[in-house]
Image: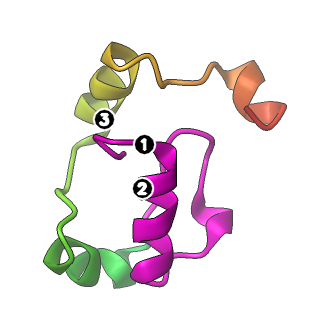
Amino acid sequence: MSDTSLDELHEFAARVGIPRRGFHGDHYDVPEEYLDEVVAAGAVPTPSRELLRRLRAAGLRLSPAERRNGG
């Protein structure tokens, strides 16, 4: 999740080598093998409940239907 924009999120993911297919409409799933690298690059590990709370608070959480339809 970005605190700025989805563009920033996509740029960060690309910079650390996470493929775009890892994007799920409002967040990236980070494979475990990338975790140390993304944290070193500035990402903050966030438990799923906290991620959901932050996405909802920011108005960025997509409904299941929105995710199925590509956002």
What is the spatial separation of the Cα atoms under label 2 and label 1, in whole angstroms?
Answer: 5 Å
> Tag on residue 39?
none
Please name the residue that numbered disc 2 is placed on. 8
What element does badge 3 sit on?
Answer: helix
Q: Are marks 2 and 1 in contact (CB under 8 Å)?
A: yes
Q: Quadrant of residue 4?
A: top left
Please tell me which of labels 2 and 3 falls first in the chain: 2
Position of residue 55 measured from the top left corner of the image (x, y, whole percent)? 38, 27
53 horizontally vs 67: left or right? left
Q: Residue at x 44, y 72 (%)?
A: 31
Q: Which residues are magenta?
A: 1-30
Compared to residue 30, the image places residue 17 above or below, namely: below
- Look at the image and tell me whether residue 28 can be seen: no
Which tag is nearer the camera, tag 3 or tag 1? 1
Looking at numbered disc 2 in the image, what kind of residue is underneath it? Glu
Please tell me which of labels 3 and 1 falls first in the chain: 1
Compared to residue 32, the image places residue 29 above or below, namely: above
Q: Badge 2: few (under 14), some or many (20 or more) residues near its Cα, within 10 Å?
A: few
Please name the residue that numbered disc 3 is placed on. 51
What element does badge 2 sit on?
Answer: helix
Looking at numbered disc 3 in the image, what kind of residue is underneath it? Leu
- Look at the image and tell me whether residue 27 can be seen: yes
Count of numbered badges drawn on the protein = 3
Q: Residue at x 21, y 81 (%)?
A: 36
What is the spatial separation of the Cα atoms under label 3 and label 1, in whole angstroms?
Answer: 15 Å
Position of residue 6 measured from the top left corner of the image (x, y, whole percent)? 50, 46
Q: Quadrant of residue 32?
A: bottom left
Q: Residue at x 73, y 24 (%)?
A: 66
> Tag on residue 5?
1
Q: Residue at x 47, y 67 (%)?
A: 11
